[in-house]
Image (cartoon, rainbow, N blue to C red):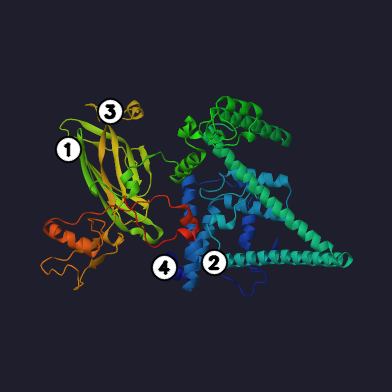
Amino acid sequence: DLKYASKKTSTLTSPGNYPKLDPHDPNPPIKPRPGRYGYQSLEVEADESIDLTTLKQTMSSTERAENLKIMRQIKKFDLADLRLRKDHAGWVDANNDLKERTKSDPWYRVNDLIKDGYLLGEDSKKMDELKAFAEKLGGPPPGVKVNDKRGYALHTDIYDIGISAGRTASALEQSILEERVKRGRAMAAERAKNMEKEQKQWEDMMRNPGDREDKEAAERRERTMARLRSEIEEDTKKREERAKEMLGQLPEMPKDSAASLESALEEAREDVKRLRQMRKEGRGLGEVSDDADLTFMNPEDRLAAEDAGITSAGTSSSGSSSSDSTNSDKMGSAAKAREAAEAATAGGRPRLPGDEDVTRGEITTTAESSSTTTTGPLTVAVTSTYNTEQSDPPMRKHCFQYTIRITNNSQTDTIQLLSRRFEIQTVGSSMKDVVQGEGVTGRTPILKPGEVFEYTSTAPLSVRPIATTIIAARMKGEYNYVTLSENQETATPDQIKQGGDDSAKLGMFHFVFPEEQRVKPITSSYEDDDDDDTSGDDDKSSTTTTTISSSSSAKAVSPPADSSASTSKSSSSSTSDSKSPPPVSSPASTLPGDSDMSSGNVPTSTVSDSSNLVT
């Protein structure tokens, strides 16, 4: 941009650049003359006087690209910089250089003619000739794109002039204004529509006062029914997907209500036949119990029962009591119902009969919270602790954590654990819950010789502490494993299907309540401190008994007996009491009570506060 400023002085003083004007000449050569678009200079007229057919492209494609690059530099930067610096002479030189470079490429002139013809609406024939001539001149310079619709390149495309910030802001404001006008018109139309609707509703209400409420109620019912139908369809689709996932295909469904009714009747007939067969065989809900009334049975079922020796009175045909019949050994309906309820409570898990001592809460073995068992090449060690953070004692929720450590003691064999099986019985429950599954914590670990696998799990129990024991539950189990061959990396599908080669036992251990969760027994002492004892012998030690009950070690003796018994036995028991601990009391047991005491109807004639019975 400074090269034009350096020529400022030479340009003004050099002869020949500007013609010498004669102030007395009536026709100066620079007098403006009217042209097609108004007054224009002689330079423009001179350019237009050149015939288009004489124009030829004298520059190569590379020269045209370099010429375009310099033109863009002058147009976008040099002229603007010279204007800001108020260098008029430099600006004139730069502008003249831009004109010369534009004239050096005749395509720019043809492009201007195509633009003028497009704006003035020239005939298509002339426009096609101009476009063909522009292509003859080599087309646009490299880097200039011609608009397909107009047929010419825009001024901004030639000089690579982007949209100005002011024009961008103006276009944005115009777009915002148009959008606001559009929204305003839409809102006005909606408002007019609503007003028209309200006016119509008001007129309808005035003509028929009750129709509006009825219509609104009908619309509400329709919306509710549509919502219910959609929910039913969605629920039906989910059921079908679940059935397809479980069964592999959708079951055959009735097509209409008549087919559905016929299917229901057929199922009812099959149920009746099945119940009759069960009654005949004496099993399930249809078994014939000893005290059953046979009047509800079908005639053929009643005859079959009488042939078996059962009458409607509940006795056999030989007159013997029904308690001697073989049906008394079968499980009744109530027992089966209880068993089904317990299975449902266990969450569908398999259950086994539990240990009697855990059921009664009278543990006959040592309550150990850990165990170590070696079975073959594996040693399984377990320790358990009480998890206070996850427990909620008022809601009978007690959580225990147990850590299991499995060690491969073999020197040569590599072992992979395949599955586990645990038996857990809580105190007071008559059944054991069986927990079994594949792997250990979702994995099938591989133990090389001497390696150890250890994991920790949580056992949430719903149990209530009792005074006769300190444990909450008893647990034992086993791990099934397979011994891998020398080059075998993991168990084969057949080995997994067979359940492994052998199993390692998880020794029995107990979940023990902490001290603060155990039941605190009531301790009472009975001391005979009466100085006026009938024995009167100060050398004889008085009998003192104390009842102590603890969940860990229980010692209890009987309350003090009468004074005569104490006197007669004091000499013989004084020595033994001082050497041996008092006997351990056994937990109380219950028996069926008397009917008159249960009902409260006790005859007053038999009530006595004493008894005298000789045995």
Name which residue type carries label 1.
Gly
Q: State which mark lies toward you, 4 or 3.
A: 3
Residue at (18, 60) in percent of width and height: 568
Number of residues whose C-alpha sits closer than 10 Å to that of mark 3, classed few (under 14), some (14–19) or many (20 or more): few
Residue at (64, 75) in percent of width and height: 24
Alpha carbon of mark 1 to alpha carbon of mark 4: how far? 93 Å
Alpha carbon of mark 4 to alpha carbon of mark 3: how far? 102 Å
Residue at (72, 66) in percent of width and height: 187
Name which residue type carries label 3.
Asp
Quarter that holds the N terminus: bottom left
Q: In terms of secondary structure, where does tag 3 sit?
A: loop
Q: Disc 2 designates what residue?
A: 165
Which comes sooner in the sequence, label 2 or label 1? 2
Q: Where does residue 61 sit, x and y in percent of width and height?
A: 49, 45
Q: Is residue 487 left or right of residue 579?
A: right
Which comes sooner in the sequence, label 4 or label 3? 4
Disc marking residue 6: 4
Q: Disc 3 designates what residue?
A: 501
Q: Disc 1 designates what residue?
A: 450
Q: State which mark lies toward you, 3 or 1.
A: 3
Q: Where does residue 30 sit, x and y in percent of width and height?
A: 62, 67
